[in-house]
Image (spheres, grey):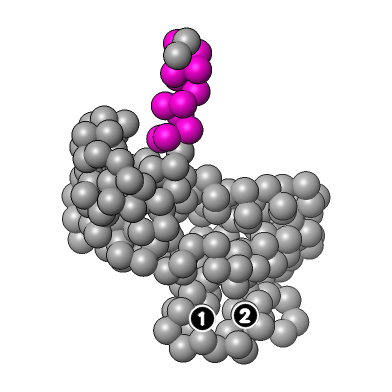
């Protein structure tokens, strides 16, 4: 096998491992990832799995990175083309709710689960969760400020408060869907997020 084909095969194998790790961690948590479980699921040796990541923590970080990339593709990228400000915020809201309804992660919102799993721990995984959520927070707050400056939203709105309420609504929606199968929850979340922007219910 040529070096180029060998490198491509390694990337493909790594991608398969990460995809399976995301699915497992979605339901069992990032701490629930084990090299043995993935090796069995993928008909690989343990050495073949760990060789791509170096450690369980490396595998956890790779799974988290992929989950964030999926969220970005499903939520941010569809909304990014909307004009900055209120229109983009409404597009983000709709894409975020649709993402939570889609079931792309078997266990629900990956970042919500990871944030609860690691909120009381130290280490690189916790720091990566914080970094991902802070990036998302910055996006929301930036567009809220832009909409306020453009006169599209009430001037008294606090962008940090909007983020807090939107994040709370998304976490609540995830719980309502995953635990209770509440079909009314997406519309409730939509109304809550609209009220956070000072929009009519």
Of residues 83 and 63, the one nearer the viewer is 63
Of pointers 1 and 2, the one earlier in the residue sequence: 1
* Mark 1, secondary structure of its residue: helix
Instruction: Look at the image and give the residue range highlighted in magenta.
Output: 3-14
Kindly report which numbered mark, 1 or 2, lies closer to the viewer in this rendering. 1
In the rendering, at what x and y percent does residue 153 appear? Answer: 73, 65
For this view, does 39 lie left or right of residue 110? Answer: left
Mark 1–mark 2 CB contact (< 8 Å): yes
For this view, does 190 lie left or right of residue 66? Answer: right
For the point 36% across and 59% down, which residue is it? Answer: 24
Q: Main secondary structure of the magenta part?
A: helix
Look at the image and tell me in which quarter the N terminus lies: top left
The residue that disc 2 covers is 186
Packing grade of label 2 (10 A; few <14, some 14-19, many >=20) is: many
For this view, does 143 lie left or right of residue 161? Answer: right
In which image quadrant can residue 124 be found? Answer: top left
Look at the image and tell me in which quarter the C terminus lies: bottom right
Of residues 145 and 135, the one nearer the viewer is 135
For this view, does 192 lie left or right of residue 7? Answer: right
In which image quadrant can residue 185 be found? Answer: bottom right
In the rendering, at what x and y percent does residue 18 appear? Answer: 40, 44
Q: Please count the marks in the image.
A: 2
Rendered view: 69 above or below 109: above
The residue that disc 1 covers is 177
Rendered view: 184 above or below 93: below
In which image quadrant can residue 162 be found? Answer: bottom right
Rendered view: 7 above or below 164: above
* Mark 2, secondary structure of its residue: helix
For the point 31% across and 31% down, which residue is it? Answer: 52
For the point 51% across and 86% down, which residue is it? Answer: 181
Does 149 lie within the magenta span? no
């Amino acid at each position: 096998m040529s070096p180029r084909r060998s490198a491509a095969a390694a990337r493909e194998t790594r991608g398969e491992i990460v995809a399976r790790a995301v699915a497992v961690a979605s339901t069992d948590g990032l701490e629930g990832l084990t090299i043995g479980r993935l090796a069995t699921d993928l008909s690989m040796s343990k050495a073949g799995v760990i060789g791509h990541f170096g450690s369980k923590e490396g595998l956890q970080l790779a799974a988290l990175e992929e989950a964030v990339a999926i969220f970005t593709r499903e939520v941010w990228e569809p909304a990014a083309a909307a004009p900055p400000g209120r229109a983009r915020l409404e597009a983000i809201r709709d894409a975020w709710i649709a993402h939570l309804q889609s079931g792309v992660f078997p266990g629900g919102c990956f970042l919500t689960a990871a944030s609860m799993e690691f909120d009381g721990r130290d280490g690189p995984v916790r720091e990566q969760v914080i970094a991902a959520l802070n990036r998302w927070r910055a996006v929301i707050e930036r567009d809220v400020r832009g909409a306020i400056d453009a006169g599209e939203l009430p001037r008294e709105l606090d962008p940090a408060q909007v983020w807090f309420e939107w994040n709370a609504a998304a976490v609540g929606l995830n719980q309502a869907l995953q635990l209770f199968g509440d079909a009314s929850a997406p519309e409730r979340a939509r109304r809550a997020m609209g009220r956070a922007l000072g929009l009519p219910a």
